Image (tube, coloured by chain):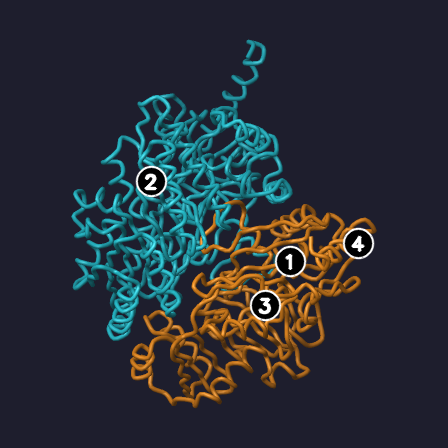
Chain colours: A orange, B cyan
Amino acid sequence: MEPVLAQLRDRIVAAHAAKTPLRLRGGGTKDFYGEQLNGEILDTRAHAGIVDYEPSELVITARCGTALSQIDATLARHGQFLAFEPPAFGGDPTIGGVVAAGLSGPRRMSAGAARDFVLGASLLNARGELLHFGGQVMKNVAGFDVSRVLCGSLGILGLITQVSLKVLPRPRVQATLRFEFDGAGALERFNTWRAQPLPISATAWHAGIASVRLAGSPSAVRAARDTLGGETLDEARADDWWSSLRDQRLPLFRENARLWRLSLAATAPLDAAGADLIEWSGALRWLRSDGPAAEIRALAERAGGTAALWHGERNGPMFHPLTASNLALHRRLKNEFDPHAIFNRGRLISEL
Amino acid sequence: MTAAELAPARDKRRDLLTALATIVPSESLLASPEQTAPFECDGLAAFRQSPLAVVLPDTEDQVRRVLRVCHDLAVPLVARGAGTGLSGGAMPCAGGIVLSLAKLTRIHEIDPLACIARVQPGVRNLAVSEAAAPHGLYYAPDPSSQIACSIGGNVAENSGGVHCLKYGLTVHNVLGVRGYTIDGEPIAFGGAALDSPGLDLLALTIGSEGLLMVVTEVTLKLVPRPKLARVVMASFDDVVKAGNAVAAIIAAGIIPAGLEMMDRKATNAVEPFVRAGYDLTAEAILLAESDGTPDEVADEIAQLEQVVKAAGSTQCVVSQSEAERLRFWSGRKNAFPAAGRVSPDYYCMDGTIPRKHLGRVLGAIEDMEKKYNLRCMNVFHAGDGNLHPLILFDANQPGEWERADRFGADILELCVGLGGTITGEHGVGIEKINSMCVQFAPEEREAFFGVKRAFDAGGLLNPGKAIPTLARCAEYGKMHVHHGQLPFADIPRF
């Protein structure tokens, strides 16, 4: 085992023996994300570097501490990218953190989520054993798909030490169209367009303006632009808009009011409460509300989804509560991987 | 077994049948040997086991109650869809029952605006696309068996198909599942929304080979049918050149809707049967599909033609009509039945490798043909590096199945050695259980058992499949050293 990895392992083994929690941390861009932060920080950034990347294989393998900026730059040199558009939150997250959080950007509606691009992962478990799940190939059904479960696990099952991600060629052309719609009008059009074979990579509505990003071959983008109409945004402004949306730099994310993230059925009607920002063709909506948490969660459930209190003063848990049987499964899984709950105790679910 | 030991087993069987008879009507409970015989194996007929009984519920509540009975009486249970699986995943367990979901064939809902279908597990894969077709939508994963295979089976195996390079596997196209754990507790993961709180147990369930839960409803993502699809068929005088052409296509920034390769043995077996119009003199042919708007397809086809020519193709044909496109694909989709026509039996492998090793693996397979004195024809999901070598043998010739079995294990070991996997889309089942010992270390297998325990502590759901025990791997390792014959019998329980 490499010395850096061995040091991480030794810290884990010691924490497991002492039953003391460890807080796994990479670039620290997502400290806000999760229920609780407990334990001594275990900084992963020393375990860094791209291990393997061959553009024609469409796979990149990197150690957990590798900076996302380095991966982006490496892929860009070969005309490729991480298609799920991971948010950087204005800092420089590590790839381990990107996978552990499992968050995806505006392109999620067309390309898929972070977990859809995870091909394999290595994990240091609570006993300090280094386990490998999945691999570096596109298709792999040997054993349970643990590497995808690690994606979005917020580190509660162990330390992700290395990941293999599927990468894709960058679209040859992009264009962003803008329309003046109210929220309901935008939602209706987003839904209708999504059910048609149009090269739409992202949609967003905010403050009376709907933005639609087209991506693909020059002819497909041209044809879609003719079909949809709207006003074409110049490239620099378009890039700025989508990256500020991805990284949550819009003023909406900086205000003091409570901001709820609603993950809903894309076609759910816009509730009386409305939405301040709509993404993913309606499947992701953001709502400023100081209303009771129970009401907002009930509203989300009626719309086929869940609500997370993204920021603002907590008036309950961040994440939507799990059903009792699902929580019981989580408890048993956590206990199998991390019986003394040393990894990110309470971060994904307060009780675990 | 002594008579004293047999008595409790008889009692247990009687108790079980009595309990099941209160749940389903008599015609849905099969217990005589003639009735259960068709359920002794799935698409992998070399592995057989007779079940105690077969239950065919037609409501979700019956499924729940059957699970509850099995849980209370500690009777193992194997869920089964259409039985088209190729890894013996639905082979019954000795002393256990088969829970056939074949009667749960209702399409609850096609929502053309939300682009989702909500279906029961017994619905056939192709039936989803047929139901969605009037809305210009379809369900993307298309395993070769799509006319017959069920969505529940697709979920259990994380099935792929010829279009998954661009459109993904089952795991990328299922939004939610609902069903029951072994104790009859209802459980749901995912749904109409794109993400859910907690761990991604939806991803864990897909491809879990019936070891974690029984699914009674699946929410599928539908995608708009592209306006046009055309396919380029390119011939090569060398399989390595064809492999390099695959890498060149990807390097050119193209993700074809499908990218498949067949070697000469495969095209020659298929052609008399399907008349797909394949170039029978070529050492390998490549099928590359482009879909999208007419302009987009025209651009991409031109680009594809240019790349395959530069990679040394000897002939390049582009489909001129939808009928011709389907004919080009029909050969590929009928490769397995064609193997069955040229040989009494065939054994289909499913290893996946990094694409760059394609040439090397093909060379090694050729050497193995000599070593085991058996022929092997090759079809690949080339874009995904997923190989389907079809080992031809005659089970009636003494020793041929054993040679085919070892031939297959050698191929899988090679795939693992090159950084690949023993199964890309067919699942481990019972067939590749020994090869799992090669791919995973004891600690990794223990983690899998940990997952299994969290869902099914009693080990009643599809026991003995997918994850080998430590003892089994130790035995396999020993035999491997001695090059002895692989044993067949006692499947360990957990």
Q: Is residue A189 visible?
A: no
Local crowd size for mark 2, using a 10 Å CA cut-off: few (<14), some (14–19), many (≥20): many
Residue to which mark 4 is pinned: A15
The relative height of residue B68 versus residue B231 in the rendered view (above or below) is: above
The numbered mark, 1 or 4, whose residue comes first in the sequence reads 4
Have a look at marks 3 and 1 and say if they share a chain: yes
Left or right of residue A207: residue B257: left
Give the alpha-carbon distance from disc 3 to disc 2, as whole Å: 49 Å
- Asked whether the residues under marks 2 and 4 belong to the same chain, the reply is no
Callout 4, which amino acid?
Ala
Q: Is residue B302 above or below residue B204?
A: below
Name the residue tied to disc 3: A307
Name the residue tied to disc 1: A160
Q: Is residue B494 at all visible to an observer of this figure?
A: yes
Gap in Å between the C-alphas at discs 1 and 4?
16 Å
Secondary element under disc 1, as helix, strand or loop, is strand
Check residue B438 in the rendering and tell me which mark sits there, or answer none: none
Which amino acid is tagged 2?
Leu
- Looking at the rendered structure, the secondary structure element under dot 3 is strand
Which residue in the protein does label 2 denote? Answer: B390
Q: Say whether residue B267 is left or right of residue B83.
A: left
Which one is nearer the viewer's eye here, A217 or A114?
A217
The location of residue B422, given as percent across then percent down, is: 47, 44
Q: Amino acid at mark 1?
A: Ile
